[in-house]
């Protein structure tokens, strides 16, 4: 029993210092890793802030009567034009994130609608003087315009 304790003690004296010498290196490596991660988190936070600012700015819309930028997407009031969707310039007034209630005064009521699990598609189609039969559509997700395809108007 005494020999076992003596052997264990000798081994402890020889082995523990070897492990102890690695601790400062491991601690230093961890400190470096913490600094790298802290820097990376800071960079990601700054990136998120920039992207949120861009997204916020892109959600702002314009009052087409005055050309002024509005801070709210729900405040645009545009009287329905007589030509609606058949006028090429009206398609140029569309802005991503407009609601269905904001698009209708510009293009008029759609000639038909299609719904799916992804959203709603407003379809505008019919005869247009000088262009023949044309078709365009506006896609909405969560009542916000996500994209559109302008009809092909000849001569415009």
Image (cartoon, rainbow, N blue to C red):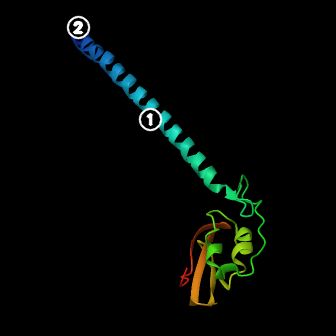
The residue shown at (64%, 62%) is: 97
Asked if one can make out residue 30 in the rendered structure from this viewpoint, the answer is: yes
Picture quadrant of residue 107: bottom right
SS of the residue at dot 1? helix
The residue shown at (36%, 20%) is: 27
Q: For this rendering, which residue is in front, 81 or 18?
A: 81
Decide: is 41 above or below 110.
above
Task: Say which label, 1 or 2, has the lower sequence index.
Answer: 2
The residue shown at (57%, 87%) is: 134
Q: Give the alpha-carbon distance from disc 1 to disc 2, as whole Å.
A: 51 Å
Decide: is 36 above or below 65.
above
Q: Is disc 1 surrounded by few (<14), some (14 to 19) or many (20+) residues within 10 Å?
A: few
Q: Position of residue 124 (x, y in %)?
A: 63, 83
Query: Looking at the figure, which quarter contains the C terminus?
Result: bottom right
Q: Position of residue 93 (x, y in %)?
A: 65, 68
Left or right? Give the position of 6 relative to 66: left
Decide: is 16 above or below 131.
above
Q: Position of residue 139 (x, y in %)?
A: 60, 73
Residue found at the very far front of the displayed protein: 155
Q: Which mark is residue 89?
A: none
Left or right? Give the position of 45 relative to 61: left
Task: Verify CB contact (< 8 Å) between mark 1 and mark 2.
Answer: no
SS of the residue at dot 2? helix
Left or right? Give the position of 28 relative to 43: left
Q: Which mark is residue 6?
A: 2
Q: Is disc 2 surrounded by few (<14), some (14 to 19) or many (20+) residues within 10 Å?
A: few
Q: Position of residue 136 (x, y in %)?
A: 58, 81
Left or right? Give the position of 156 relative to 3: right
Q: For this rendering, which residue is in front, 13 or 69?
A: 69
Asked if one can make out residue 120 in the rendered structure from this viewpoint, the answer is: no
Residue carrying label 1:
40
């Amino acid at each position: 029993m005494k020999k076992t304790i003596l052997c264990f003690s000798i081994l402890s004296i020889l082995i523990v210092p070897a492990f102890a010498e690695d601790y400062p290196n491991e601690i230093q490596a961890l400190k470096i890793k913490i600094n790298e991660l802290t820097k990376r988190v800071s960079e990601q936070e700054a990136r998120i802030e920039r992207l949120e600012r861009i997204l916020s700015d892109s959600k702002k819309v314009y009052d087409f009567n005055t050309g002024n930028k509005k801070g709210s997407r729900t405040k645009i009031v545009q009287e329905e034009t007589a030509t609606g969707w058949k006028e090429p310039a009206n398609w140029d007034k569309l802005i991503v994130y407009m609601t269905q209630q904001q698009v209708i005064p510009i293009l008029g009521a759609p000639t038909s609608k299609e719904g799916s699990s992804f959203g709603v598609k407003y379809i505008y189609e019919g005869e247009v003087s000088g262009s023949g039969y044309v078709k365009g559509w506006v896609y909405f997700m969560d009542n916000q315009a996500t994209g559109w395809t302008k009809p092909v108007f000849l001569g415009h």
